[in-house]
Image: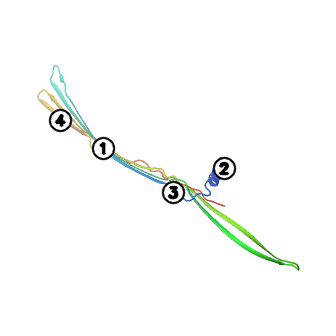
Amino acid sequence: YIYIYIYIYILLLLLLLLRTYVVVRTYVRTSSYVRTYVRTSSYVRYGTVRTYVRTYVRTYVRTYVRTYVRTYVVVRTYVRTYVRTYVRTYVTLLTLRTTTTTYVLTLRYVTLRYRYVTYVRTYVRTYVPYVRTYVTYRTYRTYVRTYVRNVRTYVRNVTLRYVTLRYVT
């Protein structure tokens, strides 16, 4: 913790006379693609004639949405100067002497805000039904089998973190 305080103090000293600046970066990426996978195979077995025709159809639809919103160091420096003038007059018997004393009071208000927002990632992965068809030819028999898988959708996490520091001198 001591190192953190020293770092903050040094950073405040370095950025004391700087003006306010804000850096915001927004990065939005959206990508999607469709993948279709078709597989067909067949073979003939000796003895009893068997022919297998297998067809696989898979379609993948993936959409990535990534948003980066990062606000870096925000330093606000307010310098207020108060000038007070006091006029003192001393009257003596021999000379007339006037003394003017000026007091300058400077107040600095420094606000250091550090915000870090991690990216929001939404990952949507959808599988359309998985169609698997078997066509089997045996002796005077035909079998047609179709398997349909489920549809799966994934949505990933969202993370948000921020830190705000204020320092007044």
Quarter of the image for residue 87 reads bottom right
Mark 3, other Cα within 10 Å: few <14 / some 14–19 / many ≥20 = few
**Which mark sits nearer the N-terminus, 3 or 4?**
3
Query: At label 1, which amino acid type do we have?
Result: Tyr
Amino acid type at mark 3: Val
State how far apart marks 3 and 4 are (Cα): 65 Å
The alpha-carbon separation of the residues under discs 2 and 4 comes to 75 Å
> What kind of element bears circle 1?
strand
Q: Residue at x 67, y 65 (%)?
A: 107
Residues under numbered marks 2 and 1 in contact, where contact means CB atoms less than 8 Å apart? no
Image location of residue 75, percent across then percent down: 57, 57
Q: Which residue is mark 2?
A: 6
Q: Report the mark closest to the observer, 3 or 2.
A: 3
Disc 4 target residue: 144
Amino acid type, callout 2: Ile
Quarter of the image holding residue 74? bottom right
Q: Nearer the observer, disc 2 or disc 1?
A: 2
In whole angstroms, how far apart are the C-alphas of marks 2 and 1? 50 Å
Numbered badge on residue 22: 3
Crowding near the residue tagged with mark 1, few <14, some 14–19, many ≥20 C-alpha atoms within 10 Å = few
Q: Circle 1 sits on which residue?
A: 33
Pick whichever, 81 or 145, lies toward us.
Answer: 81
Tell me the distance, in whole angstroms, between the alpha carbons under discs 3 and 1. Answer: 36 Å
Image vertical order of residue 76 relative to residue 135, above or below? below
Which amino acid, mark 4? Val
103 displayed left or right of 75? right
**Residue depth check, mark 3 versus mark 4: number of the one nearer the observer:** 3
| Viewer-nearest residue: 107 or 50 | 107
Label 4 CA crowd tier, 10 Å (few <14, some 14–19, many 20+) = few
The earlier-in-sequence mark between 2 and 1 is 2
Q: Position of residue 106 (x, y in %)?
A: 68, 65
Q: Is there CB contact under 8 Å for labels 2 and 4? A: no
